[in-house]
Amino acid sequence: MSRLWVTGYRSYEIGTFGEKDPKITVVKYALEQVIRQQLDLGLEWVITGGQLGVEQWSVAVALSLKAEFPQLKVAMMYPFQQFGQQWQENNQAQLRQLAAQCDFVDSVSQAPYQGPQQLKNYQKFMLSHTDAALLVYDPDFEGKTRYDLQAIEQQQATMPYPLTTIDMYSLQEYATEYEEKLAENQAFPE
């Protein structure tokens, strides 16, 4: 497995408020742990979109791992041209800043948003250009990622396509693990 599609909740879907929100720290920690596991299995590319939330957090995590894993590449694929231009300026700036650090950035559709077919084409592109997916998603707490999950499940019906999910239970476990490591590091600083 060399190319991993990472997606999940938008920031507003899990109620995060600002980059200092502890929920973001936990999600990033969870993403880091799973990406590290995938790196041990031969991961070469993290490929994601630019949505506010899990997608941007996964880019930040993957970029931070590049110092330790220089072979890791990061791609940000937008579903259409001018993606994010309707966002507030600070969110647009954050997207530009992350994109500038990626190894590859492009849009699946070379036109601005015209309709939902572009989003379906984006899903098809991601499925055909990745070997597996990582979703931060829990079906008990629906969000827009359910459409990606449905596309992945349709793909799995016709061919092997590994899917790793980080659900709410897993996030709670990662939160506990993170707190324990934090306490351990404070008790025994390096």
Image (cartoon, grey):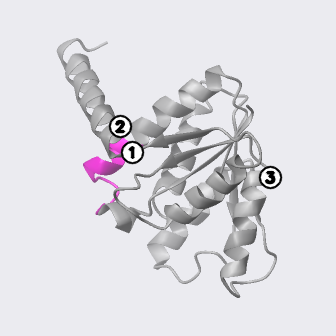
Task: Residue at 48% x, 77% y: name it.
Answer: 89
The answer to which image quadrant residue 148 occupies is: bottom right
Q: Say whether disc 2 or disc 3 marks the residue closer to the N-terminus.
A: 3
| Residue at the disc numbered 2 | 170
Q: Is residue 21 visible?
A: yes
The C terminus - image quarter: top left
Tag 2–tag 3 contact (CB < 8 Å):
no
Q: Looking at the picture, tell me which residue is in the foreground, 168 or 54.
A: 168
Provide the residue designation for mark 3. 128
Is residue 105 at all visible to an observer of this figure?
A: no
Write the residue at 57% across / 48% down: 59
Lateral position of residue 136 relative to residue 46, left or right: left
- SS at circle 2: helix
How packed mark 1 is, by other alpha carbons closer than 10 Å (few <14, some 14-19, many 20 or more), is: some
Q: Which residue range is magenta in the image?
A: 16-27
Whether residue 90 sits left or right of residue 175 in the image: it is right
Disc 3 residue type (three-letter): Ser
**Residue situated in front as seen by the camera: 57 or 63:** 57
Kindly identify the amino acid type of the residue bearing the numbered disc 1.
Answer: Asp
What type is the residue that disc 2 sits on? Ser
Q: Is residue 120 above or below residue 141?
A: below
